[in-house]
Image: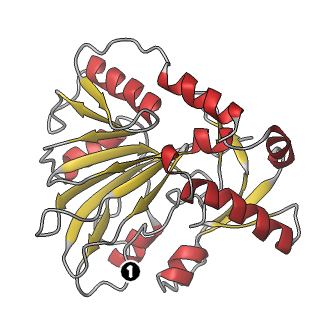
């Protein structure tokens, strides 16, 4: 890491925080992720509980709640405290628009041909207004009690990894995020209407924290608009590998039954490990619609 990145990491670790009064926050790593205890998500959150969870969420980007036996309505109610619920294109296809569409089923069995999220990505960045928050509740883990961990990466710090000349080069560039890449190319879905495809800045600013973020991901980003295809491919590969080759930017969440993990989709990427085949894992995800990414 160069000196500027190390300075940013030092600032992150030493960042002063206001004490929490009604929840307990225990960091998973110095740079990303925390476990929150002292709250029951099956009950309505008080305003103070919500405010402190939101503050911990913005600070740590990924927050983990253990032993939360929530049902579908409680799961969606929690999401609605943060905004409008997102409807995933795959859930509409799977249910033909007639079933549960505000919660996306996440499952893998011995018969699965793939696992959703296996590879570094930002959820549904192909949308004009990608989800700002995702909340995954896992109710069933592999029989051996291990497997299916999720890795999360801090994309503020991925931006800080860049040299000043590279930051200056990327400012003002935009990239295409195409839903056909994972949904058709990897998963094999062929809907009657095309998947979402939109152009977003390569460097965006978080609407709440004001910090800059590297906003490209291997899952959805096809190319940088202002470059030739060859130039774009080389630059994107370099940017993707910052996440893949820098473990210090990441934390690893180990799932236990009835764990809910909430992450800031604007400033993180994640990678779901499929290391439990032929065993099964099952859960549901609720996401909250965010803002159009801006430079």
Name above or below for residue 49 compared with residue 259. above
Residue 107 pos. (x, y %): 27, 71
Report the colour scheme.
secondary structure
Q: Residues within 10 Å of mark 1 (few under 14, many from 20)?
A: few
In this view of the protein, can residue 231 be seen by the observer?
yes
Residue 124 pos. (x, y %): 53, 60
Name the image quarter holding the N terminus.
Answer: top right
Name the image quarter holding the C terminus.
Answer: top right
At a point 24% along the width and 65% down the height, the residue shown is 147
- 77 left or right of 113? left
- 81 left or right of 185? left
Name above or below for residue 207 compared with residue 155. above
Q: Quadrant of residue 212?
A: top right
At a point 69% along the width and 61% down the height, the residue shown is 198
- 153 left or right of 235? left
Q: Nearer the viewer, residue 65 or 95?
A: 65
Residue 289 pos. (x, y %): 49, 47
In this view of the protein, can residue 208 be seen by the observer?
no
Q: Nearer the viewer, residue 68 or 228?
A: 228
């Amino acid at each position: 890491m160069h000196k500027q990145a190390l300075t940013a990491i030092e600032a992150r670790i030493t960042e002063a925080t206001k004490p929490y009064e009604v929840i307990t926050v225990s960091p998973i790593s110095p740079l990303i992720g925390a476990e929150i205890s002292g709250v029951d998500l099956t009950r309505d959150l008080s305003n103070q509980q919500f405010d402190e969870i939101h503050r911990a969420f913005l600070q740590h980007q990924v927050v983990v709640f253990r032993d939360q036996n929530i049902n579908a309505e409680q799961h969606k109610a929690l999401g609605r405290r943060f905004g409008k619920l997102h409807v995933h294109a795959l859930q509409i296809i799977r249910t033909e628009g007639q079933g549960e569409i505000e919660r996306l089923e996440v499952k893998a069995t011995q018969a699965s041909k793939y696992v959703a999220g296996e590879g570094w990505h930002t959820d549904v960045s192909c949308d004009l207004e990608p989800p700002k928050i995702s909340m995954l509740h896992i109710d069933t883990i592999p029989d051996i009690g291990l497997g299916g961990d999720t890795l999360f990466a801090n994309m503020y710090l991925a931006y800080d990894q860049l040299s000043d000349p590279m930051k200056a080069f990327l400012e003002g560039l935009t990239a295409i995020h195409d839903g056909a890449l994972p949904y058709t190319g990897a998963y094999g879905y062929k809907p009657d209407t095309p998947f979402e495809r939109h152009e977003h800045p390569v460097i965006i600013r978080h609407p709440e924290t004001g910090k800059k973020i590297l906003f490209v991901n291997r899952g959805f980003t096809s190319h940088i608009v202002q470059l030739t295809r060859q130039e774009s491919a080389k630059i994107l590969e370099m940017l993707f590998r910052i996440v893949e080759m820098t473990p210090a930017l990441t934390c690893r969440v180990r799932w236990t039954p009835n764990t809910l993990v909430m992450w800031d989709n604007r400033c993180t990427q994640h990678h779901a490990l499929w290391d439990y085949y032929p065993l099964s894992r099952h859960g549901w995800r609720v996401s909250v619609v965010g803002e159009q990414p801006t430079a």
